[in-house]
Image: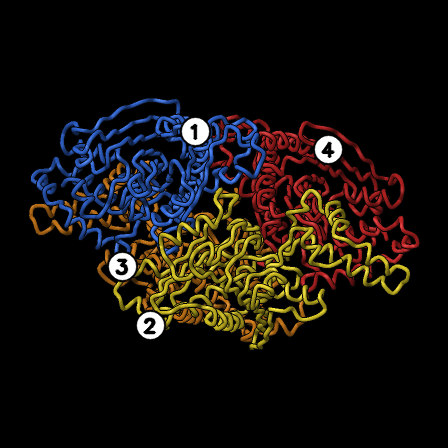
Chain colours: A blue, B yellow, C orange, D red
Amino acid sequence: MKKTELYRELGINLDLALEAHETIRGERGGEIPGVSLEEESFDTAHVRTVTVLDQRGASIIGKPPGKYITIESDVLRINNKALHEQLSKTLSEKLKETLPFKSEEDSVLIVGLGNWNATPDALGPKVVEKTMATRHLYGRVPQELTNGLRSVSAIAPGVLGITGIETAEIIKGVVEKTQPSLVIAIDALAAGSVERIGSTIQIADTGINPGSGVGNKRAGLNVETLGVPVIAIGVPTVVHAGIIAHDIIESFVEKMKNKPPLTQLTKEMSPPLLRIIIDEVLQPYSNSLMVTPKEIDDLIENTSKVIAMALTESLHPAMPEEVANYLH
Amino acid sequence: MKKTELYRELGINLDLALEAHETIRGERGGEIPGVSLEEESFDTAHVRTVTVLDQRGASIIGKPPGKYITIESDVLRINNKALHEQLSKTLSEKLKETLPFKSEEDSVLIVGLGNWNATPDALGPKVVEKTMATRHLYGRVPQELTNGLRSVSAIAPGVLGITGIETAEIIKGVVEKTQPSLVIAIDALAAGSVERIGSTIQIADTGINPGSGVGNKRAGLNVETLGVPVIAIGVPTVVHAGIIAHDIIESFVEKMKNKPPLTQLTKEMSPPLLRIIIDEVLQPYSNSLMVTPKEIDDLIENTSKVIAMALTESLHPAMPEEVANYLH
Amino acid sequence: MKKTELYRELGINLDLALEAHETIRGERGGEIPGVSLEEESFDTAHVRTVTVLDQRGASIIGKPPGKYITIESDVLRINNKALHEQLSKTLSEKLKETLPFKSEEDSVLIVGLGNWNATPDALGPKVVEKTMATRHLYGRVPQELTNGLRSVSAIAPGVLGITGIETAEIIKGVVEKTQPSLVIAIDALAAGSVERIGSTIQIADTGINPGSGVGNKRAGLNVETLGVPVIAIGVPTVVHAGIIAHDIIESFVEKMKNKPPLTQLTKEMSPPLLRIIIDEVLQPYSNSLMVTPKEIDDLIENTSKVIAMALTESLHPAMPEEVANYLH
Amino acid sequence: MKKTELYRELGINLDLALEAHETIRGERGGEIPGVSLEEESFDTAHVRTVTVLDQRGASIIGKPPGKYITIESDVLRINNKALHEQLSKTLSEKLKETLPFKSEEDSVLIVGLGNWNATPDALGPKVVEKTMATRHLYGRVPQELTNGLRSVSAIAPGVLGITGIETAEIIKGVVEKTQPSLVIAIDALAAGSVERIGSTIQIADTGINPGSGVGNKRAGLNVETLGVPVIAIGVPTVVHAGIIAHDIIESFVEKMKNKPPLTQLTKEMSPPLLRIIIDEVLQPYSNSLMVTPKEIDDLIENTSKVIAMALTESLHPAMPEEVANYLH
């Protein structure tokens, strides 16, 4: 059974381009035309960048053309400030490569997607809370204080179930009124394997595209829908239970495969069969069940700090040290 | 010293029309032309409605022409569900008199102003959290489920210090995108006396006008700025320390006044003198100091429940009982 | 593979006596000596009571002798106040049958186990927050106000990782100082299947025994350790990922079993093999991974309300209606 | 009117020994026998230590014999990490002078007094949340990891209104069970003037004595009640409205005093008159009204961080840097 078929059956979107790339390359048994992969190593992180070069690559990998930078690190799982600051510097460096600013006057709107009240989905609102908005300072404080600062605004618009409004509609309205040069959207993602949780940060210069994210944000946030470039920073915080189910059976069958004639089991596994199994085992929650580690609260807290630090460092052209210290 | 002068000196806006009315009528020694006052009694509440009839009244009382319904009750100070439900019914009844709906298709956007993280300012976001949004249900659930329900959306946009964006800009953007027929804005207010805290709910069919509210929301939310009617529901949760200071000195002088020649003290009291006294006593917080009772957490919780219940009851044309039960 | 062996391998304790009973009876293929099962039906709930009659039953089922009342209902999954009140009445009724009070002077200490900051483990602290403590009123308010009220105190002691102290030690200390006649401990449980989440409340008159609970509370809270009777109210909020893994493979094999000679697969499944599969699929979180539905926040909120209402109703001998209304 | 008489009338206890010292010395017009005062200056702080030397001093100043170290700094009012770390070092240094440890085996119980849900009273619980408990590590992790660490436990017992139990009873029970060598209690204090809020931290080696604290904790936490030494760390977060009222009238009268024969006003001011004025102006909240700045949330957050850092630094004999980094 191909994993890509399984995901289709389960209605799962692989939010990480790196995972999509690995899965599809595995199934194809070779490189994907129109998609490139680069690697870099940093002190506390390993960075792999998937670039979707053209429409051919895009249609194979299921992601629009653009850069998908994946920062992998295990320091988010531990409460260590010094290592978090190192990781934050790497994130800041990679962010800077992506920022399309033309001048210091270019402004940014940070959008924290997700739901305050559901821990694994609260990453976006937490980053907004930790971000220093500066847009309102212009014209209200002496100019010396805003020298070297970029105009930054930040909003956590809430989720459809609470507001009754598509997040994209709210953000479109805010973008039209405030005219930022760039939107940076922060989102919790669903991963294709448990080891991605608390180990991965993805920067995508294509924004957020329909169907991604933990809470299945419906409409996209990207240059097409908003009219300004959108950079998405995503962090996997959950895995769909259906993926876990598949991996467990696959692993089981793998263990059995040396016992002929059991090998034919592999052929029996199919998305519809798995759907039946999942419905049976996971009802009444088969579609909403998420697997997340007990430590999710700490992971979200650490990750939101790292991202907020990196945003401050990368966005402001020349933040004086005394200002840098004033972050929450 | 006239209180109105004091308020001007301290930069204080009397958010409650009833307080403005009482203060100005007291200072004028008689009725205010262009302003009327009506009273009604309910089981758990006393209702007084100040109507600003014309521009003359508006310029005297400092509020635009419209209806200001003040519901006074002492049941918010106690944790009693049955009494809260009674008060909620009165609030719902008075709200209904104000709602400008022309048909069941007219939709509503509820806006919870204020700051989640500061208890006395969290009333608006708390009401949003307790409100049942229905706008997203249309086209997603079977029509029977939305029969009798009005389209309601709800947003808590955050405050300027966190977002860097004027609340009014955010709401304008959302209104343009979602086209509600009516906006209902919920806000915590600053009162002119301590006894107003936890005892008063004001409904104003003129919306929110510049300079009002605990957090001094700058731009207004009203039919002029948003293009649709705005009803404001406001609840006093704090008193400026400056008002407390004035009242204490006034009370002190009153106690002294039978001891001539001390009576002349009254003349010595002036807004600039009071400003000096306040700066001296309340520094370094003279402008941000708020007086609020220890019980403020319970008051906010109770009041947000009462308002959320009243919104549900008054907004939906024919909510079936089984739906009414599904409120948070 | 026997499920009981699997649980032993995974270090999982079945917190619900009803699940232990079902599993073991299934494996034995018949009734368990020394254990009885009774059933009752209520409007919104089905109640099954497992009674462990003697040591023989206890050693088979792995629970000390006593009553384990399981209330099953699907109303916790929906936000419906009227149905929650009905379920609360059933819970109250069953609780009353368990309360060992000899007089109205007997007092109660309610203990909310678990961690405020981790949603699925926050049930206990949430019930404490919603409970009306009365113990401090005696001698401080006029006697009329405490007539018909039982002396109730309530504490949420925190978890080992934050306090550095075993919960049982804290509670022992508090019990010695405050001398309650009874302890009622509220706890989030780990269930053996997903459908138990948000559908089941267990009352156990044997208290809490070592190793149970979501956070694996080590030492027990029972008449042996505390010197007073302990009633435990437990609600499943998570399932160990290991159990999900087992059930998925079992379901898969079941689907295959009509294809001989695949039937022998069943024999291949063993706890050590499953351990290997789980470690492979769920690393690096294999021991901490919990499966919980997205709606867990609402489930915890609804359940804590139902339990707090039932405690108030069942504990106080003759609460006047006006007092009942004063609950949070 | 003597301030000391006013405080008695209003039932106010001056929690800061430095304020009591200043007030009484002012009223006596000279040094207080049996009480000494020392001053020191640090980079970001000014430290004044009031030592109550004997019973004579104690009866005059209303505090038991012991050391009361007051650290004054204005860095808590700004969000500046570097300055907070400096202040934390000063606090740590002064704490170390107070710690009565005899060996590295001596253990500590940190008690966070106050109420989670009321911002100005939440300081204690916030410090507990940010503290690294280590007591449970002994015997559970390899010894190398606990080398250089002291055994620290931490509890936030809640407040009387929620638990129904005197905090002192809970702590007595926990102390008897866990046998710490020292208790450090963290508490929010009521100050005698607004400028103390967010500017002052007091260390008292006499523990907490009856009647002090924002929430008026009744029974004391000290070596007499607990049997082990108690160090109290207190931070003023509110001022009683009654004190504000007094200061305002005093300031007013002061401004008037050059206008004879108004000078006699001073004589008219008396505690009972002030009581009447306060009741009139502040009803219905005259006893519960607290004055606190709007920024209280940030102040509490900053202060709890500074205290948690200082506790970690001062308590552990030789914390390796890699461990220091693991703090929340």
| Crowdedness near tag 4: few (<14), some (14–19) or many (≥20) residues, C-alpha within 10 Å | many
| Tag 3 residue | B140
Element under disc 3? loop
Classify mark 2: helix, strand or loop.
strand
Residue at position x 80%, y 49% in the image? D251
Q: Mark 4 lies on which chain?
A: D
Q: Do labels 1 and 4 share a chain?
A: no
Q: Mark 2 lies on which chain?
A: C
**CA–CA distance in space, label 3 to label 4:** 65 Å
- Across and down, in percent, residue A209 comes to 28, 42
The span from disc 4 to disc 2 (Cα, nearest Å) is 70 Å
Q: Which amino acid does label 2 sit on?
A: Glu
> Residue B54: x and y, percent?
56, 66
Instruction: Name the residue carrying label 1.
Output: A314
The chain identifier of the residue carrying mark 1 reads: A
Determine the residue positioned at 80% across, 48% down.
D62
The kind of residue tagged 3 is Arg
Circles 4 and 2 on the same chain: no
In the depicted view, which residue is nearer to us: B29 or C300?
A: B29
